[in-house]
Each structure stands twice: as structure tokens, then as C-alpha cells.
Image (cartoon, coloured by chain):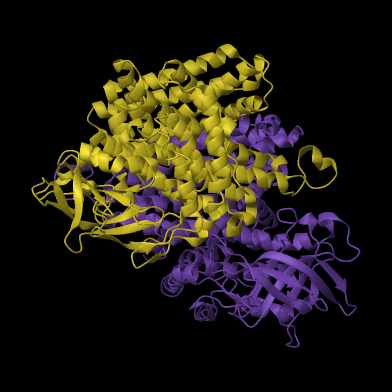
Chain colours: A purple, B yellow
């Protein structure tokens, strides 16, 4: 089963839910027009369908064998990557000054979704490069920018993020990699990094490693970490003192090499400082925030592909008799069985909700950079900060759930690798872990984002959800069913859980907030997802009233209703878990002993 | 990380929750004593830990290569299987008349859990043999029983179930395999079967295939299916006309061969009818009901092993500082972080709930066979019928969830195959599919089991849950926290959802019942799981008051509380989904179009 980029649905979500049309009207995006957006999405969709999607199985089967420090990428990757960069896709959101097209992050979000639906292992590498572009643009010296940015923006070279060491995963304070000044502005870097995505490959002539390391006089902990640019090939054309010493045998994304990188086995790998000494973590977070949204989009991407595949199978596969067909005749397509419909609708609704959430986040990032008014920029930045951990964790959690449901729809065939449904689950599983585990996202949300401006940012976001609910009530269309009351209940559950969180944090009971962080994030995702789908349903309803006969509109209304009546119903239980479940803080040592 | 059978926890659940002590006191199990139960569990645990558990990784890596119709099982499987049968483990629940030990299904349930925790691919084969023993004992002619039962009871030979054909998966009415009478009482069987677990292997000298096929004059549909015994090696020692034509490349259980079996390529495979002509489905359901509980136990088994592994990792791995440790000193073990505690407690609580549910089902099956009073037997049979689909689906669903959480606890290491956490998810995934997908279980529950005796059976079960809640309220121990009110809410949500189901079925609106079948089954599992854990907590509390200082008792109370306050909280939302979510029946064609 091949992938078809859902271009029309993406365009609808970008424009009607995430607010791209409004952003264009507000003058954020220069001479970009809605028509041009559609054209770009169409082109990207064609490329994803025709060139990238065929790489998905190949990458899974071939893997990325390592021999003598060199990695052979799966067949077809090199040609596809070259065509992809030459098509300008890597440069799409890049800075114009360095050859980028300066297009909105929001538009690129839809493209990222497509590349990753088509082949997540292929789409992953460029996400790292984009992070490198961001970090260098913001923190790199003029010299570094001049030397590296253009080639990273075009994708002629790729970038990596080197954080993790065996003893330092989520907790970077334990880093041991060292960097010593040479005296000419360069540094000698020595250490070992693990889990380096695309740390070595044969797609490009150079790979630019961004490496966290400690200076000799650095203070202990996270305040003594600096960021270095360490290229595989030095400016004089010689190979730097670094190599890929091993790759991981992983559950999924077999087409993406996960490398152990060794720096400075001989004289030390030559590197250059990015940003201020000891401020490397701040620079790295620039990369990571960008990458977190990208990873959230991977969750959406896998969910979309798994949903397409399950739908296609359910339309073809005939088993048993359902509904009207029970009266006589042959077997029904399994899509006619209510329980299969529930699975497929759950997949589609979760995917749509997660897509909205990620696109909304992208729009906030654009606005934070581009709004003419400083106060608007600040407000958008706060919104982006709030939404990023929710987008990352909710979308990757549902990526796993949807991929797992996709297997279930296939029955026994889903467990057979040949079908391809199982690969989606294997691939999806990493996205909840890398770029900060989803637990870390939940903790970030609760301890740093919810308290922003004393809670005003999160209250503002809840307010925007309430506005959707009020419009729904006014609209009162029968096709909405119980969408409005369910949405309201979900929002109010989130609001009460938010008050609980703010009280816990304000009363110096951070552990109570931490205890409920994960269910709180889920609740937030459900409320925002429900509101966003409902907003899409309102736009669809308006289009129908305006005479638009696109059958996608009633589908959007039905899907929003399904989400409200069948998925968002979990909200009250999540609220109760957040507000009443922290008893385990005291009991855990007992309950987990032995 | 190796596996240690949780023998003490199993014994506690068998005796205090599932009612083994009461069954012994009621005289159901002859001269079996609680002490003997403990001894058997200890011995089984030792065997599982020392002999079976080391096979888990080996099986996953080696697979079961097929060459010239012969399969090579993973290294060590043959020796372990022989030792296992010679230890009498296969014969444990078998009929005494054929060399079995006639021990309770309930005791064997704990053993099945152990074998499958230790190595699910290894534990799976004997589940099929047990089904074959059951089918032959109940439906086989005296001659067939005399010829085959003893060797199947001992495990000297294994058995298979041959249902699925490419066009006939969940819907067996489409079967095409044919059987023609030879005239001497035997039949010539011709056809192709897929997904045949252990259809071919090198562990035993013979394999007894139980094959569904149609007689020449058979009516169409499921009323024209008969069951045949088709041995790999015929009584005269010659090879039968059947072979393994292929094996599946699967997501998991790589140590268990999943075969395409071809019968009758030459003269037709010789087979013998089991049970009445055209009544094969009834015979097969005898096997399947048995196997469904076994598969549920596989869910528990994988969940237990994944939990042990995650707990062990979380105790060793140090990252960040949590709670009191935040004040100073080195990094904390990640088990000290509230969000990690939530994951681990969720894993442990779901595992315990699913274990209780499966053991309760086993106890009902024992009582249905052994109670001296016919009315008791009938009531127990009805209870077993009701609980079987819940045990199968709930336990296998949580098997997947717990294995996935286990990966998450490991962070990046969880995605690396070497760690072993990923294998659990890959293995667990099949259990929700085979022996009737979990959707089929939910449909069975709602359309056949809930209406039993006009709803009296399910009301009776709900009544037994209420009795636990009432005891909790009386007990009023502070350590129970909100266990009692949460349990009550969960039970009442189930009760209302049950009324909805009965009304829908009684008003000839079966689709409304089908639409909510899956969330209803989940709600049932949560309520019974919550009640069973609470029952264990009551027993633990009583033991503590009696001076028993076993630290497992406070752990049980804490875990029941965690389940009630953090997991069972989903109940209300599930109820709302069941009673208010069926709008999609009308909308699905719209929402899934395009």
C-alpha cells in the first residue's frame, strides 16, 4: 500500500484551523498567497508520493550497514536525497540571506509531515539539519555562518546533534566530553557520543556535528556546557579526527543510522565554539525546540500513513456480514463492521487532532518571529512555548496508538512484516523517546510552561478553546451531535486541572504537579485537539452553507463529532487522575519494592 | 535482565483473589493442599527461571528457519522442551485416565503465565497442544483417544489448530478445505491453511493437526464445517501427505514458527473425523475457549516480564535529581522520579489486574467441571463464559500497553534491540489478534455473554464486585485512600453501561451494542480488575492486622489504591463513550470516505 499525501486536508488545516490565511492577511509572510501555498503543497505531495514513499520498505529491510567507519545508506536514498535538495525542499524554511526561501515554518510543517509519512527514516535526517541551521543562524559567529550556513540550508551538507553520552541521557549535567582551546580560536574535542542520528552516511560530502562539551575551566553541571561545531571534513579538505564507531540495532527506523561517534582518538577533533562559552545548553535548546515540533510531526506522519493503509485494507478485505448486508448476499468489507469503524475513526480523529496541534504550534512560532508588533511576537512566543511539549508528546503518543490500531485492523496480516503495518509501529515507537522523552515534555509543560506569566498563557489558550465551544453552541447544527457539550466538558476539565497544577506549584508542592504531569498533558492534547477539530467542523459547516459541495466537509464535521463523543470522553477521568491521583508519591517506594 | 517468576504474588492471587483455597475447601480438587500448590509453583518457577527464560532472546534472534519442509527450532528449544515434558509440566492439567495429573486449570494458569513470561514463543506451542487434548477428550472417538491422547497429554507429541485460510480469517464460513471419505472411516483432506502455529518443528516425532474442512455434501457456511485429526506421521509410521510450505516473517514471537500448511498435494492427507460431521466449529470452540484464556495469560506474562525489566532498569539507571535528593548529592535512580513511578505503577497495577482476571476465569472453568452440585457447575460455566472474552482481550491489550511503557522507561535504550525491552512489545502485539481478535472478543461479550440468562450472569458478577466495595467501605483503612469511592464509581459506570447494552439488544438495535463493544469490554476489565486488586488489598490488610509483616502486603494495598485512583478513573469516560458514542454508525460512511 503506497502513500498519498493528504494535500487537501493539510491545506484545510493550515488555513482554516492553524490560521495561515489570517497570517498572510496580517502581512506576516510577504507576498506568499494562498494559491502559492496550494501549489507548493501539491508539488511536495507529488515528490513525497513518487520519490520518497518507495524508500520506506527498502530502508527498513536494508538498514544502514557500517564497515570501516563508513555507512552505506539504503538503495535509492542517495538519489532521492539529491533530488530532494535540488528541488529546494531542504531550503524551504531557511533564511533568505543564506539561500533559503524563507517560507513559513507552518507551511514547512505540512511538508515535514509528508516526508515523514513517506519514509520516516529518510525524513529524520533533514530535521537535524534544520536544527543545525537554526542554532548556527541564532548563535554562530559570522565566520561560521559564512562557512557553513549556505550548504546546510541547501542540504548539500547535513547536521547532527550530539548530546547523549552513555551516562548522560535526559540529564545532560553529567556530560564528560571535553574541548580544549588550541589558541587560534579552534578547539580540540575529545569524547564519545551515542544515539547520534545520521552521525555518518554517504548522502553528502560533509557532515556538520554540533557537539556539547566542557571547556577545561567549566563549572560543573549544566552551566558548564558549551556547544561546538565539529565538521567531518575540515575546511582544508582533510578528514577531522572523528569516526562512527558503531551503530545501534533498533526496533525501527532501520533506514536511519544511529551512531556512536568518537571524537579525538588521535590529536583531538577540531571544533569551533558556537555561541558563548558555557551557554551551550541554551544553544542546543534552540535546536531542540525546533526538533521537538519536527518529532511531533513524525507522530502525525506515521499516524496518517498507518490510517491510510488500514483504511485501504478495510475497504478490500471481506469477512462476515455487517448491518444491512447481514440480510443476505456475500461477505461485507470489514469497514462495514461497527468495531472496525470505531478503530478507523479513532485513528483518523487522533491523527487529525494531532495534526491541528502541531500546525497550531508552527503558526505560533512563525508569528513569534514575524509579527510586526512586539507584543504580538511575545504573546506568540509564549503560546509556542506552551504548545511545543504538548504537540511533541501528544502527537508521538498517538502515533504509537494509531500504528498499533493499524496492525489490529489488519488482523493476522498486521503481524506479518510483509504487510508493512508492523513497520509503522516499530518506527513510531522512537518518537515518544527522542528529543526529550514524553515524560520530560510533560514535566516541561507543567513546571515551566503552565506557570508562564502566572498562568495567563495557559488560561489564554483555554479561552481560545472556549470561544470555539461557544461558536458551536450558537451554530447548533444537528450534524454536530453532542460535539459542543463534550467539548465544553473537556475544556472545563482542563481548566480545573490547570488550577490544580498552579496551586500545587504555588504552594511549593512540585511533586504533586509532577505526579500528574503525563495525564495533564494528555488532557491538554485532547482539549486542544477537540477544539481544533471542532473549529474545522465550523469552517466546513460554513462552506457547506455557502454551497461548497466538497464531501470532505461533512467528513470533517463527522470526525469532530466522533472525537468529542468517543475520544475526548476520557477528559474527566484524566482530570480526576491529575487532581486525586498523587497518593502514589507516598506509596511508590512501598508498592515498587521487592 | 533475566526473569524471576513472581511465585509469592501468584500464590496470593490464586488463593486470596481467585479462590483456590475456597475451591480446595469445597472439595473440588481432591487431596490437593495449599502447601502442595506452593511447592508446585516453586518448582515451576525454578524451571521457568533457569531453563525457559534463557531461550527468549535466542528464539527471537535465531527464528525458525524452514528448509525443504523442515524447520529448525532455535538452539536449546529441543532440550528444554524435552526436560519440560519429562518434568510433567505438559501433563499438569491433563486427564488422569491418559497419564495427566488432573490438577486445576487455575494452578496451571499460573504455570502458563510463567512459561510465557520466560519465553512466549516457547510457551505458545503447548497452549495449542492443550487445546488439542481438550478437543479430543471431549469429542474424539474412543479409538482416536486411545491412539493420541496419552502422547499429547505428556507432550511427547504436539497439536495444532488449523482454522484460517487466506480468504477465511475471523469469518470461518468461507473455508474451502475439503475432506472426502475413503470408506474405511478415514478421510482424504485437501487444502491450504495459513497462520498455523507450530505447524512444523523438530521438537517431537509427530505433530497432530486438527483441521477444519468441509465434507462433500456439507451445507454452505459455518454449519458445514467438520473437524479432522490429521497426523504428520501416520499410525503405520509413514509420512502423511502434508507439508509446511512456508513460514511468516513476523513482528515478534520469532521462536514460534507460523506455518502455511498444505494438505493433500498427492493423494490427500489421511485424517479422521473428530466429533459429529458438520459440527466441527463446536469442537473447535472447545479448543478455542481454552486457548483464549491461555492467550490472555500470555498478555499477563509479557506484562509481568516487561515490568520486571523496567523496574530493574529504573533502580539502576541514574539521571537527574528527584525529591529529597534534589537538595544535593549525586543523581537519583530514575525510579525516584514521579513520572517514572507513574509508569512503573501503571505497569504493575495493570499486570496485577489482568492476572486476577485471568485467574478468576480459570477458577470458574475448574468449578464448572468439578463442583459437586449441578447448579453450581452451571453458574460457574456461565461465569467462565462471561469472563473469558474479557480476560483474553483486556489482558492482551494491557500486555501491549505495559510492554510499550517498558520501552519508555528505558528511554533510548528501550529502542535498541539489545536491551530486550523492544522484544516484549513485538511479542505482545500478536496476542490481541490471534484466537479471535480483541474486537471479536468484545462482540462476543456484548452480543452473547452479557445477554446470558437475560443479563442475570453479568449482574451477578457486578454484584460480586459491589460486595468488595462494601467490604472496603466497612474496613475504612486510611492506606486505602480513595480506593472505595473510585471502585464504586467504576462499578456503577459498568452497571449503567450494561443496562444500555441490554436495552440496545432488547430493542433490536444490535449495532448500538456493537458500536460500544470495545469500550464496554475495557470498562468491564477495569471494574473487575479494580475489584480484584481491592479484594487482594483487603486480604493483605487482614494479614497485616494478624501480625504478618510481609512487605508485600502494604505493596498490595498501595497498588490497589493506585489502580483505583489513577487507572480506573477512565471508567466514566468509557461509560459515556458506550452510551453516547454510537452516532458514528450513521456518520462512518461519510467520515471514512475519500
Dividing the picture into quarters, in which one does residue A150 lie? bottom right
Q: Residue at x 57, y 57 (%)?
A: A430
Dividing the picture into quarters, in which one does residue B274 lie? top left
Q: Nearer the viewer, residue B121 or B76?
A: B76
Q: Position of residue A282 (x, y in %)?
A: 76, 60
Q: Position of residue A264 (x, y in %)?
A: 79, 74
Residue at the limit of the structure toward the top, as seen here? B474
- Judge left or right: residue A504 versus residue A272: left
Q: Nearer the viewer, residue B125 or A364?
A: B125
- Judge left or right: residue B193 versus residue B122: left
- Judge left or right: residue A477 versus residue B119: left
Q: Judge whether residue B553 can be spotted in this image.
A: yes
- Judge left or right: residue A236 versus residue B582: right
Q: Quadrant of the C terminus of chain A?
A: top right
Q: Nearer the viewer, residue A574 or B473?
A: B473
Q: Quadrant of the N terminus of chain A?
A: bottom left
Residue at the limit of the structure toward the front, as seen here? B236
Q: How many numbered dots are placed on residues in this image? A: 0
Q: Residue at x 39, y 44 (%)?
A: B155
Q: Nearer the viewer, residue A192 or A577?
A: A192
Q: Position of residue B359 (x, y in %)?
A: 46, 30
In the rendered view, would you say A457 is above or below A422? above
Q: Residue at x 62, y 40 (%)?
A: B344
Q: Judge whether residue B440 can be spotted in this image.
A: no
In the rendered view, would you say A181 is above or below B118? below
Q: Position of residue A297 (x, y in %)?
A: 54, 59
Amino acid at each position: 500500500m503506497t502513500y498519498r499525501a493528504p494535500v487537501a486536508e493539510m491545506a484545510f488545516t493550515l488555513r482554516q484551523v492553524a490560521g495561515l490565511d489570517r497570517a498572510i492577511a496580517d502581512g506576516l509572510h510577504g507576498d506568499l498567497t494562498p494559491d502559492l501555498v496550494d501549489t507548493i503543497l501539491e508539488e511536495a505531495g507529488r515528490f513525497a508520493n513518487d520519490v520518497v514513499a518507495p524508500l520506506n520498505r527498502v530502508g527498513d529491510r536494508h538498514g544502514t550497514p557500517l564497515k570501516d567507519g563508513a555507512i552505506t545508506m539504503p538503495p535509492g536514498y542517495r538519489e532521492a536525497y539529491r533530488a530532494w535538495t535540488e528541488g529546494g525542499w531542504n531550503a524551504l524554511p531557511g533564511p533568505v540571506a543564506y539561500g533559503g526561501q524563507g517560507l513559513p515554518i507552518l507551511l514547512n510543517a505540512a511538508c515535514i509531515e509528508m516526508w515523514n509519512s513517506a519514509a520516516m527514516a529518510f525524513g529524520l535526517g533533514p530535521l537535524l539539519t534544520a536544527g543545525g541551521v537554526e542554532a548556527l543562524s541564532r548563535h554562530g559567529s559570522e565566520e561560521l555562518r559564512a562557512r557553513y550556513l549556505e550548504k546546510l540550508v541547501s542540504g548539500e551538507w547535513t547536521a547532527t546533534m550530539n548530546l547523549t553520552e552513555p551516562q548522560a541521557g535526559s540529564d545532560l549535567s553529567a556530560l564528560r566530553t571535553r574541548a580544549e582551546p588550541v589558541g587560534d580560536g579552534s578547539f580540540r574535542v575529545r569524547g564519545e557520543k551515542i544515539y547520534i542520528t545520521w552521525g555518518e552516511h554517504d548522502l553528502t560530502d560533509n557532515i556538520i556535528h554540533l557537539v556539547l562539551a566542557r571547556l577545561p575551566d567549566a563549572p560543573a553541571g549544566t552551566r558548564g556546557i558549551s556547544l561546538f561545531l565539529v565538521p567531518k571534513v575540515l575546511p582544508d579538505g582533510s578528514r577531522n579526527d572523528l569516526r562512527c564507531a558503531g551503530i545501534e540495532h533498533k526496533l525501527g527506523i532501520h533506514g536511519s543510522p544511529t551512531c556512536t561517534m568518537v571524537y579525538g582518538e588521535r590529536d583531538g577533533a577540531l571544533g569551533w565554539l558556537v555561541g558563548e562559552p558555557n551557554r551551550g545548553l541554551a544553544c542546543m535548546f534552540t535546536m531542540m525546540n525546533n526538533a521537538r515540533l519536527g518529532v511531533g510531526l513524525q507522530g502525525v506522519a506515521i499516524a496518517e500513513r498507518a490510517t491510510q493503509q488500514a483504511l485501504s485494507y478495510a475497504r478490500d478485505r471481506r469477512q462476515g456480514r455487517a448491518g444491512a448486508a447481514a440480510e443476505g448476499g456475500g461477505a461485507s468489507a470489514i469497514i462495514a463492521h461497527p468495531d472496525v469503524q470505531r478503530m478507523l475513526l479513532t485513528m483518523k480523529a487522533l491523527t487529525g487532532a494531532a495534526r491541528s496541534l502541531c500546525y497550531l504550534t508552527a503558526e505560533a512560532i512563525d508569528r513569534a518571529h514575524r509579527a510586526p508588533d512586539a507584543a504580538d511576537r511575545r504573546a506568540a512566543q509564549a503560546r509556542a512555548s506552551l504548545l511545543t511539549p504538548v504537540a511533541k508528546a501528544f502527537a508521538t503518543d498517538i502515533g504509537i496508538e494509531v500504528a498499533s490500531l493499524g496492525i489490529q485492523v489488519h488482523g493476522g496480516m498486521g503481524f506479518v512484516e510483509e504487510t508493512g503495518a508492523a513497520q509503522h509501529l516499530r518506527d513510531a515507537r522512537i518518537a515518544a523517546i527522542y528529543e526529550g522523552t514524553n515524560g520530560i515534555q510533560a514535566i516541561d509543560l507543567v513546571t515551566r510552561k503552565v506557570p508562564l506569566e502566572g498562568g495567563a498563557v495557559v488560561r489564554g489558550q483555554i479561552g481560545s478553546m472556549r470561544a470555539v465551544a461557544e461558536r458551536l453552541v450558537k451554530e447548533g447544527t444537528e450534524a454536530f451531535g453532542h460535539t459542543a457539550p463534550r467539548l465544553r466538558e473537556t475544556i472545563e476539565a482542563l481548566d480545573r486541572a490547570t488550577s490544580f497544577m498552579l496551586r500545587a506549584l504555588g504552594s511549593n508542592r512540585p511533586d504533586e504537579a509532577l505526579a500528574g504531569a503525563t495525564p495533564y498533558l494528555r488532557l491538554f492534547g485532547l482539549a486542544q485537539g477537540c477544539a481544533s477539530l471542532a473549529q474545522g467542523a465550523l469552517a466546513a459547516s460554513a462552506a457547506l452553507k455557502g454551497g461548497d459541495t466538497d464531501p470532505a466537509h461533512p467528513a470533517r464535521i463527522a470526525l469532530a463529532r466522533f472525537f468529542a463523543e468517543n475520544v475526548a470522553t476520557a477528559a474527566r477521568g484524566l482530570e480526576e487522575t491529575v487532581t486525586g491521583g498523587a497518593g502514589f508519591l507516598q506509596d511508590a517506594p512501598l508498592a515498587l519494592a521487592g
